[in-house]
Image (cartoon, helix red, strand yellow):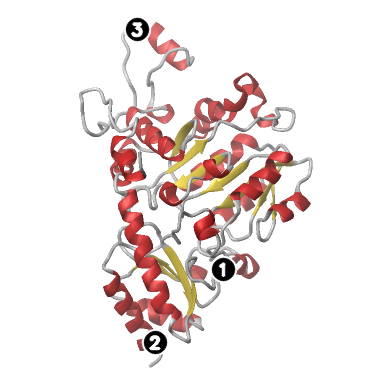
Amino acid sequence: MEFNTKLLHGKTASGYGQRELLPPISQVTAFQYESMEELEKVFAHKSMGYAYTRIGNPTIGAFEAKINELEGGAGAVCTSSGMSAISTALLAVCSSGDEIIAGNGLYGGTIDLFHDLEKLGIHTVFAGQLTGERVKELITDRTRVIFGELISNPSLTVIDIPELSSVAHEAGIPLFVDSTTATPYIARPLSLGADVVIHSTSKYINGGGNSIGGVIVDGGKFAWNFDKHTALSDFKKYGRMALLCRLRTDIWENLGGCMAPINAYLSYIGADTLGLRMERICENAYALANALDKEEDIEVNYLTLPSHPFHEYVEKELNGYGGGILTFRAGTKERAYKIINSLKYAFIASNIGDLRTLVIHPASTLYIHSGKEEAEAAGVYEDTIRVSIGIENKEDLIEDFLNAIRQSRE
């Protein structure tokens, strides 16, 4: 099946208890059983079933299955947020004294998380641009995972997954990829060589800006070295499924970062239109980027522009699409604010991936806790404006942004 057909007719799109077209919302805390013997088996993982929503819920399970099918994974675990997904995935494979190799051009919240992990004894080595050659130089006997964003937000750098996975696997290290800004519609990292893919489902997957969530999808193919990845040693008997088993029955369960059933439901129905939305969003972004690129006093950053340094990856890894984020530099912070405040069809808000076009000044918000060097490595300067493109008519968006830019010159 093609993508949009799979969303509606895939293996995980039916089979609900009372023949519903959509999974029912199991908005409950706990589930009842006829006997303690039954409940004991569920808690001991010797029998299928749900006991307590923090450790499993049928609505959440339906959403996990849907995203897992789209990504082609062995299994998925939903979390309370995208940041919870990243932190849970990393803590599942790292212990005190271990190292993570990551690119510099990361979302500000992820950078803040890496600083917090330092307090737990987990050190992050920032590679600058995350390339195979650079990673080779940085790998040590303490390296446990390589982490990168497929399309970084907001710098719009792209990692070469086949190259990175080859280097990582040669060293016995897994590659974790945050694919939030790409979505399963634009790219499927597991098929390119990644071992784990992570999404903030709050963004494009949900699409409506109505619920926070995250998901970890394990490819189930990485050959874990349990002498190296000691965090997984108690799950050695599960082999290549050790990470997924630890997530499901240990670290994720114990940290408590579960997704709410209503959020799973809203994200499930939002995902049904993911393909259609991404087509329109990418079309709009391409049109707006080209219109802005003609303005001599504006510096535009969008992947499909021929001048973009990562333009080659549009066809190589991104299925011909540039994604839904573009940034541009206005010259000064004051002018950036003036442009933002003059827009009629862009909401000033900190999310991305909404149906609506959203705009923000990242240096004074998302990267307010980052140093100048960290922010600039992520493509954030004092005059940077980030735009998350929505599904409005592209003609209206172009007119709105051009008018705001012209007003800023007055």
Circle 1/circle 2 CB separation < 8 Å = no
Residue furthest to the bottom in view is 410
**Camera-side residue: 97 or 78?**
78
Q: Which residue is mark 3?
A: 35
Give the label on residue 408, or none: 2
Nearer-N-terminus badge (1/2):
1
Give the label on residue 379, or none: 1
Q: Is residue 209 left or right of residue 80?
A: left
Residue at the image position 52 percent from the left and 70 percent from the top: 363
Please tell me in which quadrant of the rendered image residue 353 appears: bottom left
Neighbourhood count class around disc 2 (C-alpha, 10 Å): few under 14, some 14–19, many 20 upward = some
Neighbourhood count class around disc 3 (C-alpha, 10 Å): few under 14, some 14–19, many 20 upward = few
Q: Which quadrant of the figure contains the N terminus?
A: top left
Gap in angstroms between the C-alphas marked 1 and 2: 22 Å
Give coordinates of residue 121: x percent, y percent.
Answer: 70, 43
Neighbourhood count class around disc 1 (C-alpha, 10 Å): few under 14, some 14–19, many 20 upward = many
Q: Amino acid at mark 2?
A: Ser
Q: Is residue 397 left or right of residue 95?
A: left
